[in-house]
Image (spheres, rainbow, N blue to C red):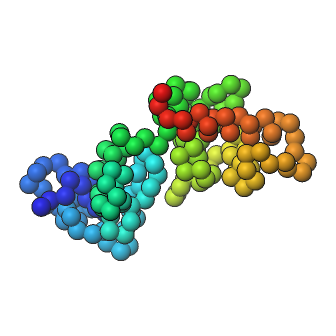
Amino acid sequence: MIAVSCLQCGTPAVRDDASFCRRCGLPYGDAPRADAELPTCPVCYLTVDDDGRTNSLDLPGLRVDLRHHMREHDRHPVGDDEWLEALREGDKLRWGRWTAPFETVRRYLVTGQVDAGRNRKLAHDMIVTAMTQINRFGANATIFGDQPEWEAARTAVSELMERYAQGRR
């Protein structure tokens, strides 16, 4: 049986009778090569395991390919992306008087870590610094030498995190 997508790069099969991935040349259903960079889910930023699969969100114990995992996010959203998109202005996110790089903030809201991911540069500004402080010290920490502006930024990020985590309304 042919898998619906390549386990190494995540590229979907174009035809039912396709046997090799058009992008990396690996036969569909074969485990990724040991030296290959594995694909990451653009929704939850989860990188597939060494077998090219991840645990199913629907059925515990079932291992699924990346495309199947991405379809499962329709039933298992990571947060309220529609609301977050409503706050988007180009490649920035604006809420209240705050702005920050959209992708960086979304990644933080989903993973809870200030991590730009592989081969990405993290954009530093007040909001990203506030996210770093929350990650390190917690949302309600008292920081020695803190300034009102930094505390306000942490409060804004905390409120954004809480609203995003509520999910779709």
Residue furthest toward the bottom?
Answer: 34
> Looking at the image, which is closer to me, 105 or 36?
105
Instruction: Tell me residue 59's x, y (percent).
Output: 31, 54
Q: Is residue 27 visible?
A: yes
Work out whether residue 85 or residue 164 is closer to the camera in this orientation and state it: 164
Residue 9 appears in view: no
Question: Who's the residue at 55% across and 51% down the image?
Answer: 111
Image coordinates of residue 75 in percent, x first then y, are: 35, 40
In this rendering, the answer to whether 100 lies above or below 33 is: above
The residue drawn where x is 68% and y is 52% is 135
The residue positioned farthest toward the front in the image shown: 60
- Residue at the outermost left position: 17
Of residues 169 and 143, the one nearer the viewer is 169
Residue visible at 82% across and 36% down?
149
The residue positioned 51% from the left and 58% from the top of the image is 118
Task: Note whether 38 is above or below 162 in the view shown.
Answer: below
Question: Which of the 4 quarters of the picture holds residue 37?
Answer: bottom left
Q: Is residue 110 left or right of residue 132?
A: left
Residue 112 as seen in the image, left or right of residue 20: right
For residue 87, above or below residue 109: above
Quadrant showing the N terminus: bottom left
